[in-house]
Image (tube, coloured by chain):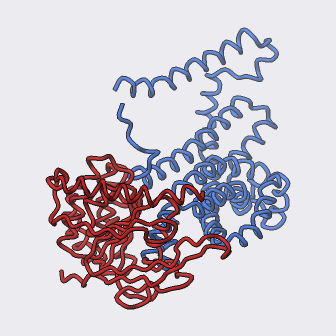
Chain colours: A red, B blue
Amino acid sequence: MSLPAAATVELQTVTQNFGDASRLPILDGLSVRAAPGEFISLIGPSGCGKSTLLRLLAGLATPTTGQVLINNQPADASPAERAFIFQDATLLPWLTVQHNTELLLKLRSVPSDVRRDRAARLLSLARIAHLAHRYPRQLSGGEKMRVSLARALTLEPSLLLLDEPFGALDELTRELLNEELLALHARQQWTAFFVTHSVTEAVFLSSRILVLSSGRIAHDVPVDLPFPRTTATRELPAFHQRVAEVSRLLRSASVPVARSA
Amino acid sequence: MNRRLLTFALPILTGVLLVALWQVVRIWILRPDQQFLLPAPDAVARAFVEKAPQLWAATLTTATGALCGFLLATVVGALLALILSLSPLVRAGLYPWLMALQLTPIIVVTPILILWVGPGLKSVTLITFLISFFSIVVNTTQGLVSTDRNLLDLFRMGRATRLQQIRLLRIPAALPYFFTGLRIAAALAPIGAISGDMFAGNSGDGQGGLGFLAVIYSAQLQIPALFATAITSCLLGFVFAGAVIWLSWLALHRWHDAYQPTDS
């Protein structure tokens, strides 16, 4: 399949208020630009605006002031295909893995033979082709997340938005899925925004990490470890050094929030 | 394996014990002049054989009324639930009146219905409908409005239309609730039909139902036959409940957690 080019994302002094303006804004004059194919992780204390940022990029909300541009068009009007992956795998329990994977295409009224083929291809990319006829209750947490990932990728997105997708998985499964997510990224080259609480995960996956605090970017950290990253990457001293650095930045970013809370 | 055999054998054993207890009560507890109140099991069995043609015909009549009323309740109940699920305002406007309908004793409504549509199958169907549709409406509505928020988000982000959301998400998610309502309705439908034909069963155009038969046998003090009628009614209830349990198994067992095979 010919994949669409990865999206360019630009936030221009975006502010987002909820309810009355007297309260602190969720996002406070935030500006950032993501080049096509960048893998950006968002970390920060709870309530720092990570999920709000994803919702804006998904076009599910519009900013109070400022602009969210995807390929130079406002996010809520952009035709750029975006896929969202939730912490919960959000599979329909009454559909088989195959039909769950076809769901988003079905919502777009894609013909059934195209749906079937594309879902089957992505299920084998996600290494779960053998589970196609199972129901979600027969799957492990990691398998469910693979289905969720495969389903998102059927849309051939140019921008992938992931909200703590591996947060509920055990450490080993999480590491494995991190590696496979990177392998898929290398193949398909979407732009990714990945929300996580795990510094290790953020360092492993990202080309860049944004540490958010009180609705602003406290630190914009490039991760210069070479791709492709594999299990061996986790052993590198440089990897541990980055994790330590980012952890330190995250701690320093968390302090003012804790004080104002 | 042994356990399965046991779950099959135990109810039968309990049944045998109950029949024995029945005999004990009859022979040792009741005075001879009271014994006619509780006929012997074999007398009931004989009544079954003797009255078989009447019982069978009455069962068919009652089953027809119960089935018509039940099907009507299923269709109307499900459609009404769909309408109720569309908006909280619709629910606010209609719910109290549905409640009022449910809380009016059916026995009082029956004469009105007979006046309107006359005795026979039509009024028995309506009585059955009235007694059984409420549980379908309430449960199905509950199911339609309590769809998982995460799944609704998924549909919203997938730019699903309202119709897609209802058809592909809300309705399948409501199925377990619908079947809960259906199971209650299936238990009530034969009761509705039987009490219906106690009042409206003999339309003059054919055979009366089980309720009608019970009225006749009690007037004639044919007590073994009355017991046989009661047992037949009970069996009819089992057939209804069993059919719905089977249907809900068919619809849900592949994916619903309630049917998860146990590992032990």
Q: Is residue A147 found left or right of A233 in the rendered image?
A: right
On-image quarter of the N terminus of chain A = bottom left
- The location of residue A186, given as percent across then percent down, is 18, 70
Which residue shows up at 28% across the image and 73% down it?
A154
* Side (left or right) of B24 relative to B31: left
Q: Nearer the viewer, residue B151 or B23?
A: B151
The quarter of the displayed image where residue B123 is located: bottom right
Q: Position of residue B191 (x, y in %)?
A: 69, 47
**Closer to us: B19 or A22:** A22
Residue A232 position (above or below residue B40): below
The residue that appears at 50% across and 70% down in the rendered structure is: A215
In the rendered view, does A168 fall on the left or right side of A147?
A: right
Q: Can residue B146 be seen?
A: yes
The residue under the point 51% across, 20% down is B13
Q: Residue at x 65, y 34 (%)?
A: B228
Question: Residue B182 location, x and y as percent?
Answer: 58, 53
